[in-house]
């Protein structure tokens, strides 16, 4: 890596304390989390204040930062509750607050003046003048809009001296930087307050107004029509360009995702950044890491607005559905000395005779054949493992407690 370039921070999501621990162990430099209120993923999971304290303590043991997300749009009647919420954060050693609302920014500066403030992608920052405006308000970092081109990104970095963060992986949205009203119009659930119903992912039909029960499919692919559906962002192949441009942080989307997704994407981008630092990031390694990303469920990948010269890819949603080449079958529970193998908590069904792929922090994936498995409950031998079973994989020896178990579909 050139002397004048620093390695960008790898910032990854966590929806709960358990996933935060996976993120830390798989190589995150920082983790962003949310509480039970005032963030755009408040509909499920997230941290109580007590869990947040434990998460911050755990992350800081490993030198990993924790940023707290408060990026919902706040209504006037919510301000009293927001002030109380911010006061609760005074005694928690978070490393920064991610926000999108100007009123929230004012209150954070008043109530938590010592905390670093990061501006969310929801603010739609597209130019250096806007970014420098936020610097004057005391902001430390901005996440630029996904719609910014690479040439504009380089120009922004040259014209500002505030930290610039870029999304490199995860779900895209059909609206502008996530400012969407579709869910609220259709279901009453406001995506700008963390309650998105993901109406853009639904399957739609046409209905003639005088024939109310006659539905006509708009044919597009064999699974149906998803006219608002979008691809998943993946800038892995452009990561060196982003590093050379001088971005301060690369961010992975996915605060609603599982430990499998968070761990795998963190493992991939950690490895990529390390190879870039050693000047060993070539086409062969990019292809290898893309094949690893394929082991987690995802939609068709795109390089999005930043690098695409032809926007047709973003407009063409034909055959854009979930790609599931592997199934996530379990997480580590403990080690069974009698059978010399890990006990795993089963997530999805699998059978003896199948080839299992085991991913562990800092290691290459390991493939093993499942020769024998036994119930941890009564030592009975099993040919089939079902969700929520505790199953001993006999003869595999000890594995890392943060190992993930996958099988090709």
Image (tube, rainbow, N blue to C red):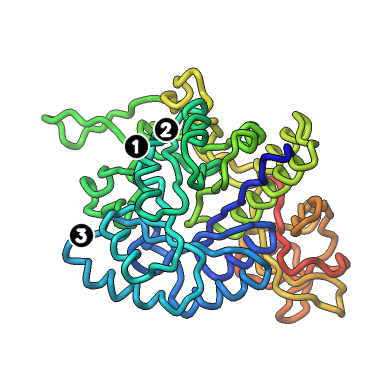
Question: Residue at the left extreme?
Answer: 210
Residue 85: quadrant of the picture: bottom left
- The residue at which mark 3 appears reads as 75
Badge 2 vs badge 1, beta-carbon distance below 8 Å: yes
Label 3 residue SS: loop
Q: Quadrant of the N terminus?
A: top right
> Number of callouts in the render?
3
Q: Residues within 10 Å of mark 2 (few under 14, many from 20)?
A: some
Residue matched to label 1: 176
**Residue 29 point in image, percent of width and height:** 63, 57
First of labels 2, 1 by sequence position: 2
- Circle 2 sits on which residue? 147
Q: Secondary structure at mark 1?
A: loop
Image coordinates of residue 334 in percent, x first then y, are: 74, 75
Residue under the image location 30 percent in, 52 percent down: 192
Image spot of residue 250 (x, y percent): 57, 45
Question: Who is closer to the viewer here, 25 or 108?
Answer: 108
Q: CA distance from mark 2 to mark 1?
A: 8 Å
As drawn, 144 above or below 136: above
Would you call the spot at circle 1 few (<14 residues within 10 Å), some (14-19), or many (20 or more)?
some
Left or right placement of residue 17 versus residue 393 in this view: left
Q: Quadrant of the C terminus?
A: top right
The first of marks 1 and 3 along the sequence is 3
């Amino acid at each position: 890596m050139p002397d004048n370039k620093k390695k960008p921070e790898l910032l990854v999501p966590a929806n709960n304390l358990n996933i935060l621990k996976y993120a830390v162990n798989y190589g995150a430099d920082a983790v962003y989390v949310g509480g039970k209120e005032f963030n755009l993923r408040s509909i499920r999971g997230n941290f109580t204040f007590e869990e947040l304290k434990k998460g911050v303590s755990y992350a800081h043991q490993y030198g990993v930062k924790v940023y707290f997300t408060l990026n919902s749009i706040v209504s006037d009647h919510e301000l009293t509750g927001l002030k109380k919420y911010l006061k609760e954060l005074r005694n928690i050693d978070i490393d920064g607050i991610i926000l999108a609302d100007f009123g929230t920014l004012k209150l954070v500066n008043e109530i938590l003046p010592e905390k670093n403030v990061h501006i969310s992608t929801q603010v739609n920052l597209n130019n250096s003048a806007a970014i420098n405006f936020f610097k004057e308000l005391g902001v430390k970092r901005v996440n630029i809009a996904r719609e910014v081109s690479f040439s504009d990104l380089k120009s922004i970095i040259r014209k500002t001296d505030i930290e610039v963060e870029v999304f490199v992986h995860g779900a895209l949205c059909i609206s502008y930087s996530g400012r969407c009203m579709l869910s609220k119009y259709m279901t009453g659930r406001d995506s700008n307050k963390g309650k998105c119903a993901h109406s853009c992912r639904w399957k739609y039909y046409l209905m003639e107004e005088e024939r109310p029960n006659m539905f006509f499919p708009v044919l597009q692919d064999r699974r149906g029509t998803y006219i608002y559906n979008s691809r998943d962002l993946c800038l892995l192949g452009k990561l060196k360009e982003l590093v050379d441009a001088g971005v301060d942080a690369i961010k992975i989307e996915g605060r609603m995702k599982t430990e499998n997704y968070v761990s795998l994407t963190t493992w991939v981008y950690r490895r990529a950044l390390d190879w870039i630092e050693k000047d060993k990031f070539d086409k062969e390694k990019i292809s290898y890491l893309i094949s690893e990303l394929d082991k987690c469920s995802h939609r068709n990948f795109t390089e999005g607005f930043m690098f695409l010269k032809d926007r047709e890819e973003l407009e063409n949603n034909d055959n854009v559905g979930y790609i599931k080449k592997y199934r996530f079958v379990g997480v580590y529970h403990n080690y069974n000395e009698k059978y010399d193998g890990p006990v795993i908590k089963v997530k999805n069904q699998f059978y003896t005779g199948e080839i299992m792929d085991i991913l562990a922090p800092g290691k290459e994936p390991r493939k093993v054949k499942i020769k024998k498995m036994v119930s941890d409950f009564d030592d009975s031998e099993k040919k089939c493992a079902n969700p929520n079973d505790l199953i001993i994989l006999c003869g595999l020896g000890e594995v890392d407690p943060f190992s993930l178990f996958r099988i090709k579909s």
